[in-house]
Amino acid sequence: MSLDRTILAFAGVMVLLSVALTVWVSPLFVWFTVFIGLNLLQSAFTGFCPAAMVFRKLGVKPGTAF
């Protein structure tokens, strides 16, 4: 799997996890969902994604977006 698809899959898992935590643990976990959304938005405009740097160091093959 390329870096781009890995990042998209990771973001999807994090959103689903944060929604589940919001529903079953505490409504304050909605801020985790907001953080994920803001990070996705800033990476769309700047091209900077901290998760991409981590996955690249873990050996995920490069994609075209990050």
Image (cartoon, grey):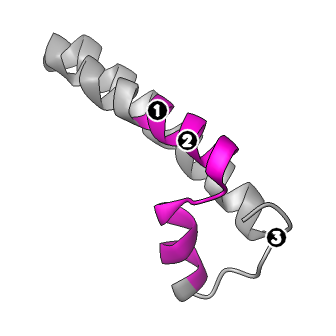
Q: Is residue 41 left or right of residue 51?
A: right
Residue at disc 3, secondary structure: loop
How packed mark 1 is, by other alpha carbons closer than 10 Å (few <14, some 14-19, many 20 or more), is few
Q: Residue at x 15, y 20 (%)?
A: 25
The C terminus sits in image quarter: bottom right
Q: Earlier in the sequence, mark 3 or mark 2?
A: 2
Q: Residue at x 22, y 23 (%)?
A: 29
| Contact between labelled residues 2 and 1, with CB atoms less than 8 Å apart | yes
How packed mark 3 is, by other alpha carbons closer than 10 Å (few <14, some 14-19, many 20 or more), is some
Q: Residue at x 86, y 67 (%)?
A: 64
Q: Is residue 39 left or right of residue 63?
A: left
Q: Position of residue 55 (x, y in %)?
A: 55, 74
Measure the alpha-carbon separation of dots 3 and 1: 22 Å
Mark drawn on residue 38: 1
Q: Up-down: is 66 above or below 54?
A: above
| Contact between labelled residues 2 and 3, with CB atoms less than 8 Å apart | no
Q: Position of residue 52 (x, y in %)?
A: 58, 67
